[in-house]
Amino acid sequence: MHILTAWLLLWQDPFGNYVVQYVLELGHSEATESIMRQLCGHYPELAQQKFSSNVVEKCLKLGGQSLAEMRERVIRELLNSPLMPRLLQVNSSSTLFARFLPNWLALLLLHRITHRILLWL
């Protein structure tokens, strides 16, 4: 079985999503980024589902500067998705959006401002 298929199955499984959340919480930024990168292109679909939306939420809660770029990528994928109207209606993803949307927008703005300041230095 391809590793991406395995991760997708784990994210969507009632018990497997806890395994993925545990791995993400271990704090190994390279492994976490690798997992998050492999799922790029699937976040809108995953955010719609009850169990995998918990993992999407965990990805967005992960701290650390090393994951800031990856979180921004996930946020952009969700906000730019053609599934956005549906995401706002589905219970699991609408809760996710209600909880994080103001923070996402603030994080994107902060990241862009920080990036511009670093370019000026």
Image (tube, helix red, strand yellow):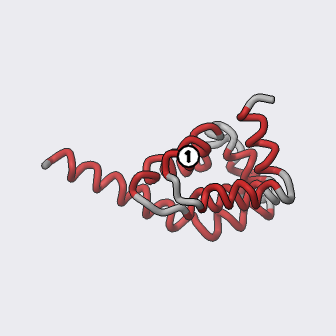
Name the quadrant containing residue 98. Answer: bottom right
Q: Position of residue 64 (x, y in %)?
A: 43, 60
Q: Is residue 95 above or below residue 70?
A: below
Q: Badge 1: how crowded within 10 Å, few (<14), some, or many (20+)?
A: few
Task: Give the labeled residue for mark 1.
Answer: 31
- The kind of secondary structure element at disc 1 is helix
Report the side of 111 relative to 2 (left or right).
left
- x and y percent of residue 95 in the render? 71, 67
Q: Residue most toward the top? A: 2
**Residue 81 percent across, percent down from the top left:** 64, 42
For the point 62% across and 70% down, the residue is 99
Along the viewing direction, whichever of 118 and 14 lies nearer the viewer: 14
In the rendered structure, the answer to whether residue 110 lies left or right of residue 105 reads left
Q: Nearer the viewer, residue 86 or 11?
A: 11
Identify which residue, 44 or 9, lies in the foreground. Answer: 9
| Residue at screen point 43% across, 55% down | 108
Image point 77% across, 35% down: which residue?
5
How many numbered dots are placed on residues in this image?
1
The quarter in which the N terminus is drawn is top right
Q: Is residue 29 above or below residue 54?
A: above
Of all residues, the one furthest to the right in this rendering is 14
Residue plotted at (77% across, 56% down): 17
The image quarter containing residue 39 is: top right
